[in-house]
Amino acid sequence: MSQPRTLECDGMWDGGPMVPEEPIADWLDQGTSDPRQVAERYDDWAQRYDDDLAAWSYRAPASVAEVVATRLPDAASVLDVGCGTGLVGRALRERGVTARLLGLDISTASLDVARAGGLYESLEEADLQQRLPLEDGRVDAVVCVGVMTYLPEVEAVWRELARVARPGGLVVLTQREDLWHERGCQDVVDRLRDDGVWTPLEVTGPAPYLPQGYGGTPAVGCYYLTALVS
């Protein structure tokens, strides 16, 4: 079993103190929402990320790709919000999804890895806690996998995901099991339904997410949400 890695951070925030070295398992478990810290950590991790996640038996990309392929097989475009190094894009292609792939992420180094893979039509740096840089109804499906940990304003983010999907399009996302309850995610699902934003199709969980934990920590579960945009 692989050992938890330590990420080295050499940068400084606006003249502030350096971020200390910290085992990746500890940092991931904290779920920081500071976009600058998230960007720095994932920039440092980008070249090792795919290998680490494979060692940890990361299941979410394949699970979400299966949902898209099954529920919207003729999708012409998929927006991958928090695309990172492109794991979801690869899973979609492996499942036979031929849609144009668009990716957003805050980590430029991760985007470089995704770009090298050649699967995404466009890749753009974006702070996912802000309004997404797409017009309303732009894509057929929106996926957001392994990202909500860092986005505490759940309702605002989910409304944005729905905004950029066309009516009749899909939103498919994951949320860590503990944060699903802590952040009142089921209440948000219901409010967006009641507001006519979407129709929830399925909420599954807790389901396997990182069965090996973060490289030696206890297993981590998640919830999967699939919704049809109104």
Image (cartoon, rainbow, N blue to C red):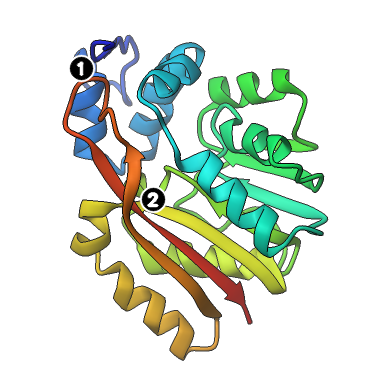
Residue 17 location, quadrant = top left
Instruction: Pick whichever of labels 1 and 2 is earlier in the sequence.
Output: 1
Q: Residue at x 45, y 80 (%)?
A: 192
Where residue 217 sits in the image (x, y, percent)?
17, 26
Answer above or below: position of 9 versus 64.
Answer: above
- On-image quarter of the C terminus: bottom right
User: Quick check: marks 1 and 2 in contact, CB under 8 Å?
Assistant: no
Residue 13 is left or right of residue 131, and the answer is: left
Residue 188 location, quadrant = bottom left
Answer above or below: position of 80 versus 70.
Answer: above
| Residue placed most toward the observer, 92 or 188 | 92
Where residue 99 sits in the image (x, y, percent)?
80, 48
Where residue 177 sits in the image (x, y, percent)?
26, 53
Q: Residue at x 52, y 65 (%)?
A: 226
**For numbered disc 2, what is the local secondary structure?**
helix
* Disc 2 residue type (three-letter): Met
Provide the residue designation for mark 2: 148
Provide the residue designation for mark 1: 23
Residue 43 is left or right of residue 17, and the answer is: right
Q: Residue at x 31, y 44 (%)?
A: 33
Measure the alpha-carbon separation of dots 1 and 2: 21 Å
Residue 131 location, quadrant = bottom right
Q: Residue at x 67, y 50 (%)?
A: 79
Where residue 51 sits in the image (x, y, percent)?
46, 15
In this view of the protein, can residue 74 be seen by the observer?
A: yes
* Disc 1 residue type (three-letter): Pro
Residue 50 is left or right of residue 33, and the answer is: right
| Residue placed most toward the observer, 90 or 110 | 90
- On-image quarter of the N terminus: top left
Count of numbered marks:
2
Q: Residues within 10 Å of mark 2 (few under 14, many from 20)?
A: many
